[in-house]
């Protein structure tokens, strides 16, 4: 087995354009029709060129070939082959079969035999002999029964062999248990590595075969046709449904309960009924307003005493109330309260100051009518009025006490405020006088020994330190006025 790059005469870094140019050139050179003198050799070289181009033109197959090129070349030639694992690398080219038929060298015969051998080899190395492995089948095999299950199993192929011949250490020669465990770990890694490599090889071969299997291609075409037919049937069904709805819409008749004429009549009836209701309500409101006006007039005609907060139904009762002692006391208190407010607001006049209770010394004379004696009903009313007067007298006494307390509290507050203002002014004057006197008093600094005067204390202290005049000194100053400044 030759390297595909050597067959096409290109480097491993060759681009797709380089591969196409080399393939066209070699295909024309070794085509059997142009080499009639050496047809056998030309056919062999032409198939080899075509197989190499098919692998290298596919990016996926080319990447896998580049990763396993050395192994494929070594195992393909048969050198250094120790185990009995079936070598599948010679089958990664289309030169291993002739035509897509069931002949001895045909596509389906070659690969059916290959996958049978791989399955038998796996079953021999497996402990479970009951596993059923699907076969590759022939060119006429059913896709649902043979082809589909075959590719479903082999596309996820996992070998059943143990690959114990890949182990490098014999655990029987281990010195102790620790060494034996390390050997087992190394042997397990080697076995797993070999299994992974075998699985990748078989899966890549399945991808290679599936791409060239005519049964898969026919199945793909069949599924595409089925999808197109389904899509066409769906569009036809939607068109029929749309046409049916249009026909129903053309034959549609409006039901009687949905007709607009009846609806308009109902609206008119409803509007008329609402108007009638509102007219009735307006008339009722008008009558209520008249009644309210009458009641308000009756209220205005009633007699009311502002000082005592009482109302009377007759002139006679009102005059009797004005002549009562309680009423006069309340009027006096009210006038005193008003006069106090006027003094606070500076609204008093000479006429208001001379107000007295002389207005209430007059006697109100009632008209004398020769009427018969009072009836029983009038006596009952008089009793009730007397009771009301008693209750009102109690209320008036309470109000009188409250007004007197307010007047006394206001007078006390005014006296305290006046006293506080006078004391504050006196304190302010005393503090200002003392501060002024203290500020004008000069301080004389002189040395007790040499009687020399100094303007500042620092100069005096420096003089004492330099001349050693550190003796008790007496500071002569003019008499000070002692003041006590209180901090507020």
Image: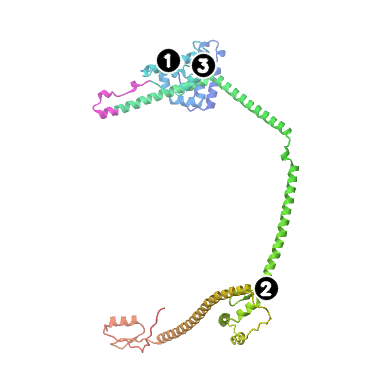
Nearer-the-camera pick, 27 or 291 = 291
Mark 1, Cα crowd under 10 Å, few <14 / some 14-19 / many 20+, is few
Element under disc 1? helix
Residue 107: give its label.
none
Q: Residue furthest left?
A: 175
Q: Is residue 362 left or right of residue 216?
A: right
Q: Earlier in the sequence, mark 1 or mark 2?
A: 1
From the viewer's perspective, is the residue at label 3 or at label 2 nearer?
2
Q: Is residue 24 left or right of residue 287?
A: left
Q: Earlier in the sequence, mark 3 or mark 2?
A: 3
From the viewer's perspective, is the residue at label 1 or at label 2 nearer?
2
Q: Is residue 405 left or right of residue 357?
A: left
Residue 39 is a magenta residue: no
Q: Is residue 179 above or below residue 472?
A: above
From the viewer's perspective, is the residue at label 3 or at label 1 nearer?
1
Q: Is residue 74 above or below residue 440?
A: above
> What whole-number distance in Å separates the C-alpha atoms at marks 3 and 2?
134 Å
Q: Which residue is mark 3?
A: 47
**Which span of residues is magenta-colored?**
161-182
Across the whole image, how many numbered discs are drawn on residues? 3
Nearer-the-camera pick, 371 or 241 = 371
| CB within 8 Å, label 1 to label 2 | no
Image quadrant containing the C terminus: bottom left
Residue 301: give its label.
2
- Residue at image point 47% right, 14% down: 110
Element under disc 2? helix
- Looking at the picture, how far across and down is residue 213, in whole percent? 52, 18
Q: Which residue is mark 1?
A: 117
Q: Is residue 78 left or right of residue 142?
A: left
Residue 166 is a magenta residue: yes
Q: Is residue 64 above or below residue 449?
A: above
Nearer-the-camera pick, 408 or 82 = 408
């Amino acid at each position: 087995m030759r390297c595909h790059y050597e067959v096409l005469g290109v480097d491993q870094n060759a681009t797709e354009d380089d591969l196409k140019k080399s393939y066209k050139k070699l295909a024309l050179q070794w085509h059997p029709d142009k080499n009639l003198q050496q047809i056998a050799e030309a056919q062999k070289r032409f198939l080899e060129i075509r197989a190499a181009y098919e692998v290298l033109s596919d990016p996926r197959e080319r990447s896998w070939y580049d990763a396993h090129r050395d192994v494929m070349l070594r195992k393909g030639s048969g050198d250094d082959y120790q185990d009995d694992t079936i070598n599948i690398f010679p089958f990664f080219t289309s030169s291993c079969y002739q035509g897509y038929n069931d002949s001895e060298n045909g596509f389906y015969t070659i690969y059916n035999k290959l996958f049978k051998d791989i399955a038998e080899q796996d079953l021999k190395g497996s402990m479970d002999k009951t596993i059923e492995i699907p076969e590759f089948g022939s060119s006429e095999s059913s896709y649902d029964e043979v082809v589909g299950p075959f590719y479903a199993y082999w596309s996820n192929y996992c070998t059943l062999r143990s690959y114990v011949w890949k182990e490098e250490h014999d655990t029987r020669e281990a010195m102790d248990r620790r060494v034996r465990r390390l050997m087992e770990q190394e042997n397990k890694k080697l076995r797993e590595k070999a299994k992974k490599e075998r699985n990748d090889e078989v899966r890549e071969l399945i991808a290679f075969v599936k791409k060239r299997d005519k049964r898969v291609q026919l199945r793909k075409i069949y599924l595409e046709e089925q999808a197109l037919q389904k899509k066409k049937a769906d569009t036809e069904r939607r068109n029929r449904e749309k046409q049916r709805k249009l026909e129903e819409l053309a034959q549609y008749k409006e039901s009687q309960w949905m007709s607009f004429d009846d609806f308009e009549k109902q609206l008119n009836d409803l509007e008329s009924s609402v108007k009638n209701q509102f007219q009735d309500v307006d008339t009722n409101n008008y009558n209520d307003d008249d009644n309210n006006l009458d009641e308000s007039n009756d209220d205005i005609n009633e007699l009311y005493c502002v000082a005592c907060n009482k109302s009377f139904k007759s002139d006679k009762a009102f005059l009797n109330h004005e002549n009562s002692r309680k009423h006069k006391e309340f009027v006096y208190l009210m006038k005193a309260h008003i006069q106090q407010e006027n003094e606070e607001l500076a609204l008093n006049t000479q006429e208001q100051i001379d107000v007295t209770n002389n207005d209430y010394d007059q006697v109100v004379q009632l008209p004398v009518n020769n009427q018969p004696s009072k009836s029983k009903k009038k006596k009952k009313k008089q009793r009730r009025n007397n009771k009301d007067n008693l209750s009102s007298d109690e209320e008036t006494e309470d109000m009188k006490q409250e007004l007197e307390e307010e007047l006394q509290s206001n007078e006390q507050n005014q006296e305290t405020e006046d006293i506080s203002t006078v004391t504050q002014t006196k304190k302010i004057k005393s503090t200002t006088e003392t501060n002024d006197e203290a500020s004008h008093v000069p301080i004389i600094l002189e040395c007790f020994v040499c009687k020399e005067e100094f303007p500042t204390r620092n100069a005096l202290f420096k003089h004492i330190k330099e001349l050693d005049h550190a003796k008790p000194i007496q500071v002569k100053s003019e008499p000070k006025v002692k003041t006590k400044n209180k901090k507020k």
